[in-house]
Amino acid sequence: MAIGALGGLAVGAAVGAAVAPPVYAAPVPVYRAPPPPPPVYVEERAPVYYERPVRERVYVEHCETERYREWVPGWGWEHRSRRVCR
C-alpha cells in the first residue's frame, strides 16, 4: 500500500512539473517611472497696444407701427395701422 501511495505521489509530481511553467521563465515586469519632462522656458513678450477703430455714425431708421381708427362712410369706424419712420 505504501508503494502505491509513493507511486501516485511520484506520478502527480511529474504531471505537475510538466504543466507548471519553468522556474527560469522571464522575470515579472517591474514598473519604472518615466523620465522627468524637459524644462520649459517662457519668453517675456512686450505688451501689444492697438487703437480702437473710430466708428462712423450710421443713420438708422426708427420705424413704428401706428394704429388709429378712421370713419368710413356707410361702414362705420374701421381700425387701421400704418408704418411711420423717423
Image (cartoon, rainbow, N blue to C red):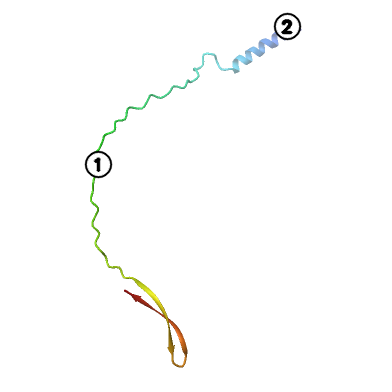
Give how far across and how far down residue 42 sits, in percent.
29, 33
Query: What's the mark number on residue 47?
Result: 1
Q: Considering only vertical position in the picture, is 80 above or below 53?
A: below
Seen from the viewer's position, the closer of residues 39 and 33 is 39
Is residue 67 positioned above or below 20 on the image? below
Residue situated furthest right in the rendering: 1
Label 2 environment density (alpha carbons within 10 Å; few <14, some 14–19, many ≥20) = few
The residue nearer to you, when weighing 32 against 79, is 79
Residue at 63% x, 13% y is 14
Question: Real-space Cα distance between discs 2 and 1?
Answer: 95 Å
Q: Position of residue 16 (x, y in %)?
A: 62, 15
Give amino acid for label 1.
Pro
What residue is shown at x 25% (from left), y 64% (from top)?
57
Look at label 2 and name its amino acid. Answer: Ile
Viewer-side residue, 12 vs 31: 31
Q: Which residue corresponds to the image point at 24% horizontal and 62% vertical from the top-left?
A: 56
Residue situated furthest bottom in the rendering: 74
Q: Which quadrant of the structure image shows residue 69? A: bottom left
In the rendered structure, the answer to whether residue 27 lies left or right of residue 10 reads left
Q: Residue 50: x and y, percent?
A: 23, 48
Circle 2 residue: 3
Q: Is residue 16 left or right of residue 59?
A: right
